[in-house]
Amino acid sequence: MLILKEEHYIGEGDFQKCYVHPNNQNLCIKVKIKGNDSHNRVEKEIKYYERIQNKRSNYFEYPFLAKFYKKEETNLGTGFVYDLIRDETTNNISLTLYDYLIMDKSPYSDKLFLEHLKKLKEQLIKHKVIVRDLTGKNICCKVLKNGLIELVIVDGVGYKDIFPFVEYIGFYRRMKINKIYRKKKLNSLNELRTFFDK
């Protein structure tokens, strides 16, 4: 059993708390937050991760989605092990898009982020990946050795549709992902910043 301590804590969302894996600094482990209705949501997300990784991750042009590895038991309950996104320049845990957008002086321009968000959208459409909770806090900005960046989704994958048209019909998939981008204000960073304040 893995023992997770306060020193391993990174942060949390609505459904899970995230910790640095005690045995591997390049992995994180997410544990469900007790007392909320997270079980079904998390289990569905894991099943979706496993399905898309088995079929598609080897064909991704770049790793835009944090990889899920396995379940592990911890002192805080069942944990789910993923890649921990770190900057290649410093080995620090990568900041999220949200972190950069609320900075007074971000090292990266809005234009650059919009270019990468557009690239990310095209990859989601091409590789048939749906992320229903695609927010600035669920997208890490990984700084590469050459100073360039990549956007990596770390949470919120899957969808609630009963019939999986988006899995098989490109028109519906593009429509679905475009709708998610509009809903989450990912086409305009000024709108997205306003969205953060709500």
Image (tube, grey):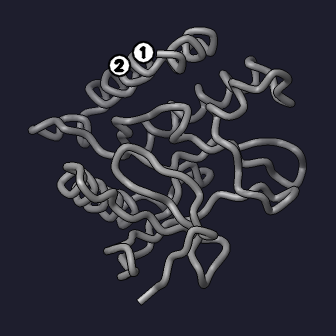
Left or right of residue 7, residue 169 in this image: left
Q: Are marks 1 and 2 in contact (CB under 8 Å)?
A: yes
Q: Residue at x 36, y 76 (%)?
A: 71
Left or right of residue 66, residue 32 in this image: left
Q: Residue at x 72, y 31 (%)?
A: 100
Image height check: is 192 above or below 136? above
- In which quadrant is the N terminus drawn? bottom left
Q: CA distance from mark 1 to mark 2?
A: 5 Å
Give the residue number, with chain letter if any, for mark 1: 182
The foreground one among 171 and 97 is: 97
Q: Quadrant of residue 156?
A: top left
Image height check: is 191 above or below 109? above
**Dot 1, how many residues are within 10 Å of its Cα: few (below 14), some (14-19), or many (20+)?**
few
Q: Residue at x 25, y 61 (%)?
A: 47
How many numbered dots are placed on residues in this image? 2
Residue reaching furthest left?
162
Q: Residue at x 48, y 68 (%)?
A: 29
Q: Quadrant of residue 114?
A: top right
Which numbered circle lies on residue 179? 2
Q: Secondary structure at mark 2?
A: helix
Give the residue type that dot 1 points to. Answer: Arg
Q: Position of residue 94 (x, y in %)?
A: 70, 50
Give the residue type that dot 2 points to. Answer: Lys
Image height check: is 172 above or below 89? above
